Amino acid sequence: MFSVTLCLIMKIRNVSLKSIEARRYITQAEHPKQIRIDHNSSFTQISYIRDKQSSIEFQYTASFGPVGMIKLEGSLIYENEDAKKITDEWNKTRKIPNQTASHVHTAIMHACVPEAVGIAKDIGLPPPIPLPQVRLGETPKTGQAGPEVA
């Protein structure tokens, strides 16, 4: 568990995972030329706890198209002056303000993507993050910036 402080007031605390599901749909001998990796996070439940705190249950999915998927479920504590208002709005409309949603989804991604990288390695899927490409002896294309390798 860890805490992430956002906007000096809004805090995300105690991000914890409850469930991990990972599947590989094809054998490791089969190698598609390109794999599109899609990330998605969603809120499944928001409940008011006390003193400006709400519990947010979430689901994160990394989809590797026809190759496989990784799904993580968990919860976190959202702490802010508007926690009660956010919870009431969620229970009525299943929506929360965009700025709050953006901060919470970012915290979910920061917690889940590193976990998904390890899980992907264990079941033979590509890492769900772009890995840097090192090209020696090539001149960089215009507009392409990156570290120099000697």
Image (cartoon, rainbow, N blue to C red):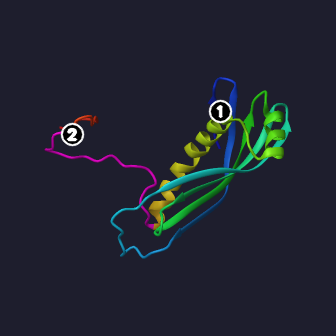
- Of 42 and 55, nearer the camera is 42
Q: Which residue is mark 2?
A: 141
Q: Is residue 146 left or right of residue 11?
A: left
Q: Position of residue 129 (x, y in %)?
A: 44, 50
Q: Which residue is mark 1?
A: 99
Q: Amino acid at mark 1?
A: Gln
Q: Is residue 125 magenta?
A: yes
* Residue 103 place in picture, x, y as percent: 63, 36
Number of numbered discs present? 2
Residue at left offset 53%, top offset 53%? 39
Disc 1 is placed on an element classified as helix
Q: Position of residue 48 (x, y in %)?
A: 84, 40
Quadrant housing the N terminus: top right
- At 76% from the left edge and 47% from the top edge, which residue is drawn? 94
Residue positioned 29% across, 48% down in the render: 133
Secondary structure category for the residue under label 2: loop
Q: Position of residue 87 (x, y in %)?
A: 81, 40
Q: Residue at x 74, y 43 (%)?
A: 95
Out of 49 and 14, give the one closest to the viewer: 49
Q: Which residues are magenta?
A: 124-140
Label 1 neighbourhood size at 10 Å, few (<14), some (14-19), many (20+)?
Answer: few
Q: Report, in whole angstroms, how far the alpha carbon at label 2 lies from the one at label 1.
A: 36 Å
> Residue 47: which disc?
none
- 128 sits left or right of 89 in the view: left
